[in-house]
Image (cartoon, rainbow, N blue to C red):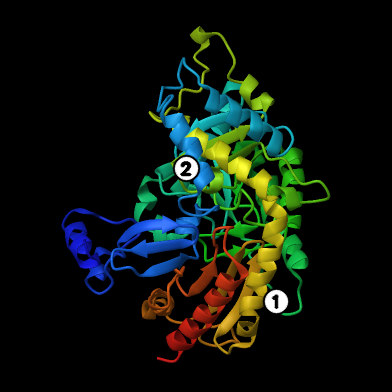
Amino acid sequence: MSNADLIARDLKVVWHPCTQMKDTEAMPPVPIRRGEGVWLEDFDGNRYIDAVSSWWVNIFGHANPAINDRIKTQLDTLEHVMLAGFSHEPAVELAERLVDLTPAGLTRAFYADNGSAAVEVALKMSFHYWRNTGHGEKTRFINMGNSYHGETLGALAVGDVDLYKKTYEPLLLKPLTARSPDCYQREPGVSWEEHSRAVFADMEALLAEHAHETCAVIVEPLLQCAGHMRMYHPVYLELLREACDRYGVHLIADEIAVGFGRTGTLFACEQAGERGISPDFMCLSKGLTAGYLPLSITMTTDDIYAAFYDDYANLNAFLHSHSYTGNPLACAAALATLDEFERRDQIAVNRQLAQHMADAVAPLAEHPNVGEVRQTGMVLAIEMVADKASGTPFDWRERRGIRVYQHALSQGALLRPLGDVIYFMPPYVITPEQIEHLGKVAAQGIERAVST
């Protein structure tokens, strides 16, 4: 089979996600035959470094032998059983290990099957908690500007990226929105910490006025991924945890994209304050199974669990469910993923890889059409602008980021942009030499994109 063969079949039957399908007339989907390590290979033998981890999920490489073996072993034992009224060892072991690894106080694991579902669980569970404890007046949520939490209706509602949300606005609940602590917006000479502290005043004001009707604040710790990889200082999380405690409001940490080593620690919440913070809910997915199988978990506390523990007749149980909740194969993949972290001492390795990423793109910081090069751990973003001095962006309709993407494919790299932001979020098995190649490809692509 050739690339052309599969593309022709695909375009007759498949509707692709996050895609204007008319674009496929000029940019057809890239057919992938196999993957190995950081590489994806198409049917014509072309290879591409998966620099975006296939939408941020793949952390230990494609066709990882250890994860493959764990799933194969599980497949011969139990492929699936419902988790309502039943249990199985992979689900129990994974929950036990995550209780040990996540911030203190997160002692209960509720399974779902994708990131949006984990957010839905947290939203419903927070609302339901307040109802069960006699605070039915709490029905609202506070989010942050430029945030993204998924595309099912509840998760979409508490996001703030118009590209995804605006069309569906009539269907959505209405959150209160605090200003984003996005440090790209800071004034010249102001540090990340100073900016994040100053911006927190907006969140403080919302909580002071609306805490009586607010269930929870939901945030993406340190990094707003779909919001063009905008980043902020961990002091914001420290201030937010203290304020949520003071005002009697839950804190939901959406670590779906940033958990499992992406930000330099296993979980981003660990970087707030001297000892990290513990949210009331932590949503996990993506890297949880190293990109192998759909699985998500909402971690929460004994206090929240206790509010639902009651006689059946009182109808206080949390009845949210998915058919593939706690799937044994997915849990096996997640357990193998946690094993890989331990075997490789991956967090320490990532610090070295992150420095290689910084070095590979360092010259771009002075480029006249690069507004900022920013980095948090294993996530690096390059913001293209029309004018560096003023920060004026390019007209979004020019789609200059796509030009970088197309150049990168021709050079053996997958660099799918977010608008005019080019970013690296590679698997942790990438080598310094491969990172150096990505840096050169990005620089070439940006030069081509801004010069035409």
Q: Is residue 284 above or below residue 180?
A: above
Residue 106 found in image quarter: top right
Q: Quadrant of the C terminus?
A: bottom left
Q: Amino acid at mark 2?
A: Asn
Residue visible at 45% across and 62% down?
Answer: 39
Helix or strand or loop: what does disc 2 sit on?
Answer: helix
What's the residue type where badge 1 is placed? Glu
Q: Residues within 10 Å of mark 2 (few under 14, many from 20)?
A: some
Left or right of residue 94: residue 315: left
Label 2 vs 1, first from the N-terminus? 2
Depth check: 361 or 338 in front? 338
Number of marks drawn: 2
**Residue sitting nearer the eye, 215 or 219:** 219
Give the spatial CA distance, label 2 vs label 1: 49 Å
Measuring from the top left, give residue 393's x and y in whole percent: 50, 80
Apparent side of residue 211 relative to residue 91 in the rendered image (left or right): right
User: Residue 279 placed where, x, y %?
Assistant: 68, 40
Task: Single out the mark in the foreground, 2 or 1.
Answer: 2
Is residue 62 visible in the rendered image? The answer is yes
Residue 187 circle label = 1
Residue 265 place in picture, x, y as percent: 70, 52
Name the foreground residue: 433 vs 224. Answer: 433
Circle 1 packing at 10 Å, graded few (<14), some (14-19), many (20+), is few
Do we see residue 327 in this rendering?
no
Location of residue 320 by image quarter: top left
Q: Which mark is residue 340?
A: none
Element carrying mark 1: loop
Name the quadrant of the N terminus: bottom left
The numbered disc on residue 68 is 2
Q: Quadrant of residue 244?
A: top right
Residue 56 point in image, percent of width and height: 50, 56
